[in-house]
Image (tube, grey):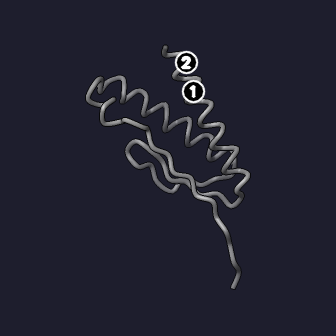
Amino acid sequence: MTSHDATLLFTDIEGSTRLWDADADAMSDALAQHDELSRAAVERHRGLVIKMTGDGMYASFESSIDAVVATAEIQQALADLVGRAS
């Protein structure tokens, strides 16, 4: 029997209910961008998307370093989107 450690990543869009109530069309677009950016970053860093969870994602990585790098990439990409939208 072998032992295997995994690093898990969970994302969630903060305040999504309020955002859906304020502008469902804009939130739908933002969610699609979130999903696309998040999935791409996870896969680029050798992670596995386990489940998209409505306004978030659940992913697994064999390497904690890959998980951290993917997380930082997701955060930066989302911050860039917000900056462009402002």
In this rendering, the answer to whether 34 lies above or below 53 is: above
Q: Which residue is mark 2?
A: 83
Q: Depth check: give the residue in front, 19 or 59.
A: 19
On screen, residue 40 versus residue 24, left or right, reads right
Q: Position of residue 59 (x, y in %)?
A: 55, 54
On screen, residue 49 versus residue 21, left or right, reads right
Q: Could you say which disc has been placed on residue 69 in the image?
A: none
Q: Position of residue 77 (x, y in %)?
A: 60, 30
Q: Position of residue 48 (x, y in %)?
A: 59, 55
On screen, residue 75 versus residue 54, left or right, reads right
- Circles 1 and 2, Cβ within 8 Å, touching? The answer is yes
Q: Residue at x 42, y 33 (%)?
A: 31
Mark 1 and mark 2: span between their CA atoms? Answer: 6 Å
In the figure, residue 19 lies in which quadrant?
top left
Q: Residue at x 71, y 58 (%)?
A: 63
Q: Depth check: give the residue in front, 44 or 16.
A: 16
Q: Secondary structure at mark 2?
A: helix
Q: Which residue is mark 1?
A: 79
In the figure, residue 38 lies in which quadrant?
top right
The residue furthest bottom is 1
Q: Secondary structure at mark 1?
A: helix
Q: Depth check: give the residue in front, 40 or 68.
A: 68
Q: Residue at x 55, y 18 (%)?
A: 83
* Three-letter residue code for mark 2: Gly
* Three-letter residue code for mark 1: Ala
- Quarter of the figure that contains the N terminus: bottom right
In this rendering, the answer to whether 17 lies above or below 82 is: below
On screen, residue 10 versus residue 15, left or right, reads right
Task: Judge the density around disc 1: few (<14), some (14-19), many (≥20) Cα neighbours within 10 Å.
Answer: few
Q: Residue at x 63, y 47 (%)?
A: 43
In the figure, residue 76 lies in which quadrant?
top right
